[in-house]
Image (cartoon, rainbow, N blue to C red):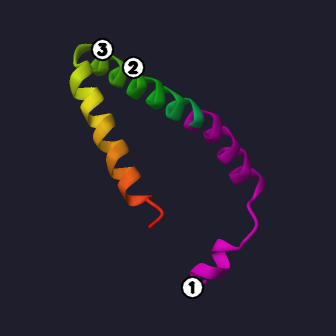
Amino acid sequence: MPSSASTANAPLSSSRLQQVSRQEPEQQEDFSELVSDVSAAVQRYCSRRPRVAAGCLFTLGFIVGWKMRPW
């Protein structure tokens, strides 16, 4: 039984390489679709509840500013 270290460093066969290269554009499309769906949902929420969104962003900015203070 080969060790996992030797199989992890083994070169990819041409069929495996083609399979990986075919999956990559599909994963990019899935990720871009996910990002666009999330951004649309955030925009819709912010337009429906601007005060809640502003409060969340103010709180986030306050916490980040508090943690990054120089002293």
Numbered circle sitting on residue 40: 2
Q: Which residues are magenta?
A: 2-27
Q: Main secondary structure of the magenta part?
A: helix
Q: Which of the 4 quarters of the picture holds residue 43?
A: top left
Of mark 2 and mark 1, the one earlier in the sequence is 1
**Disc 1 element:** loop
Task: Write down the residue under mark 3.
Answer: 47
Q: Is residue 31 left or right of residue 15?
A: left
Dot 2 amino acid type: Ala
Please state which of residues 28 and 14 is positioned toward the viewer in this rendering: 28
Task: Write down the residue under mark 1.
Answer: 1
Q: Nearer the viewer, mark 1 or mark 3?
A: 3
- Residue in view at x 58 percent, y 79 percent: 4
- Residue in view at x 25 percent, y 32 percent: 55
Q: Is residue 21 left or right of residue 40?
A: right
Q: Does the magenta run of residues contain 18? A: yes
